[in-house]
Image (spheres, helix red, strand yellow):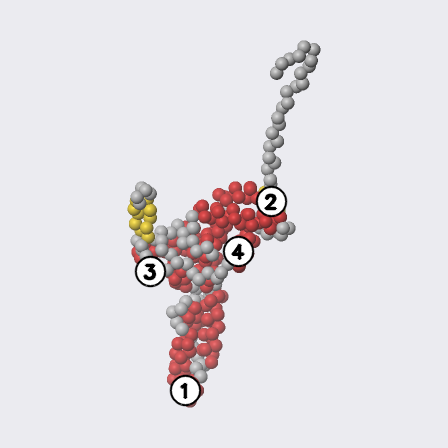
C-alpha cells in the first residue's frame, strides 16, 4: 500500500470469528427424593460409567429380552443409554415429563412379545447372569427379594458350568490375522435352566412366598382336592403339586384324573360320577 504524505491511513480491518454457541439440551431426571428436575442431557450421558447396578441390569435385560442380544457388551449398554436419553430429550422438547427410564418402559411395552432367548455362547459374566435371572423370575412371578447375594453367585457358577458342558468355544485366526471366537451349536437353554433353578428355590412351606404362576396353579389344585373330598394332604404337599404344574412337570388334567381315581376308592358309591366328571 502506497502512503500519501499528509494522509492518515485508516486502521487495518480486523476479522472477528464468532464462535458457534453450544446448544444445551435438557431432560427430566428424578432427584434423590424422586422428584423430577431439569438437567443437562450431556451430563447424564457422561454418567453412564457410574450407573448403579440395578440400572445396568435394566439395560442388560432390555438388550436380552427385546433386542435379542445373547451377551450384551458394555458398548451396547452405553449405546442404549444414549438412545434413551435422546428419547427423553425429544419428550422434553414436546413438553412431556419423561425420564430415560420412562422411555425404556414405553419401548418395552411397545415391542413385540419376547418369545424367549436363544443362546449359543458358553461363557457368562455377572451382569448377564443377573439379567437372565431377573427376566425369568419376572416371567414366573418369583419374588426377586428372596434371592440372596450368595444365590446370585451360585447361579452364575452353575449356569456357566452347564453352558460350558454343553457347548464348545474355539478361537482361530482368519486370513486377515484377526482372532475370531467360534461357538459350536449347543442344546443348552438358558431360560429352561434358569426356571428350573428358581423353582428349586421355592419355599413349599409358605404359600405366600410361592411364585405367582404357582399360586394360580395352587388355586386349581385346591379346587380339585375339595371337589374330590380329599383333605389329608399337608399345605407343603399341596404347594408341591402346584409347583409341579406351574413348572411344567405335571399336567393339570393328569392331576384331576389322579385324584378322581383316588376319591373313587374312598367313596365307591360316587365312583361312576367321579369317573365321568372328575
Kindly give the residue lying farthest to the right in the view shown: 6
Q: Residues within 10 Å of mark 1 (few under 14, many from 20)?
A: some
Q: Earlier in the sequence, mark 2 or mark 1?
A: 2
Q: Quarter-wise, where is residue 275 in the image?
A: bottom left
127 is higher (above) or lower (below) than 249: above
Residue 271 got which mark? 1
Residue under the point 39% across and 78% down: 258
Contact? badges 3 and 4 (CB < 8 Å): no
Of the residues tagged 3 and 4, which is closer to the observer? 4
Which sits earlier in the primary sequence, circle 1 or circle 3?
Answer: 3
Q: Position of residue 127 (x, y in %)?
A: 43, 50
Cα–Cα span, label 1 and label 3 = 46 Å
* 85 relative to 122 in the view: left or right: right
List the residue tagged with mark 4. 107
**Local crowd size for mark 4, using a 10 Å CA cut-off: few (<14), some (14–19), many (≥20):** some
Q: Which residue is mark 3?
A: 187
Q: As drawn, is 178 to the left or to the right of 207?
A: left
From the image, tell me which residue sits under label 2: 26
SS for dot 1? helix
Determine if residue 137 is in view: no
Question: How far apart are the two marked residues, 2 and 3, measured between alpha carbons?
Answer: 47 Å
Nearest to N terminus: mark 4 or mark 1 = 4
Spatial CA span between label 2 and label 1: 73 Å
Question: Residue 219, image x and y in percent?
Answer: 48, 73
For residue 130, side relative to residue 25 (left or right): left
Q: Nearer the viewer, mark 4 or mark 1?
A: 4
Element type where label 4 sits in the image: helix
Residue shown at the point (32%, 50%) measured from the top left: 182
| Distance from Cα at disc 4 to Cα at disc 1 | 55 Å
Q: Secondary structure at mark 2?
A: strand
Amino acid at each position: 500500500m502506497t502512503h500519501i504524505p499528509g494522509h492518515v491511513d485508516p486502521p487495518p480491518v480486523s476479522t472477528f470469528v464468532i464462535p458457534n454457541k453450544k446448544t444445551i439440551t435438557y431432560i427430566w431426571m428424578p432427584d434423590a427424593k424422586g422428584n423430577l428436575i431439569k438437567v443437562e442431557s450431556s451430563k447424564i450421558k457422561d454418567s453412564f460409567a457410574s450407573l448403579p447396578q440395578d440400572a445396568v441390569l435394566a439395560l442388560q435385560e432390555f438388550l436380552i429380552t427385546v433386542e435379542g442380544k445373547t451377551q450384551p457388551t458394555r458398548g451396547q449398554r452405553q449405546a442404549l443409554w444414549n438412545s434413551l436419553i435422546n428419547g427423553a430429550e425429544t419428550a422434553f422438547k414436546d413438553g412431556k415429563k419423561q425420564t430415560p427410564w420412562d422411555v425404556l418402559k414405553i419401548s418395552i411395552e411397545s415391542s413385540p412379545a419376547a418369545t424367549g432367548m436363544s443362546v449359543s455362547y458358553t461363557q457368562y459374566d455377572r451382569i448377564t447372569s443377573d439379567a437372565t435371572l431377573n427376566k425369568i423370575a419376572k416371567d414366573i412371578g418369583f419374588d426377586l427379594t428372596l434371592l440372596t447375594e450368595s444365590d446370585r453367585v451360585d447361579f452364575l457358577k452353575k449356569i456357566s458350568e452347564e453352558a460350558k458342558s454343553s457347548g464348545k468355544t474355539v478361537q482361530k485366526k482368519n486370513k486377515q490375522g484377526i482372532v475370531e471366537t467360534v461357538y459350536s451349536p449347543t442344546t443348552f437353554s438358558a431360560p429352561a435352566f434358569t426356571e428350573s433353578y428358581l423353582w428349586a428355590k421355592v419355599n413349599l412351606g409358605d404359600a405366600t412366598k410361592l411364585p405367582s404362576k404357582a399360586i394360580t396353579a395352587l388355586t386349581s389344585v385346591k379346587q380339585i382336592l375339595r371337589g374330590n373330598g380329599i383333605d389329608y394332604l399337608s399345605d407343603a404337599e399341596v404347594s408341591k403339586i402346584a409347583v409341579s404344574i406351574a413348572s411344567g412337570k405335571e399336567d393339570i388334567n393328569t392331576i384331576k384324573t389322579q385324584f378322581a381315581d383316588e376319591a373313587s376308592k374312598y367313596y365307591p358309591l360316587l365312583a361312576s360320577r367321579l369317573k365321568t366328571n372328575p
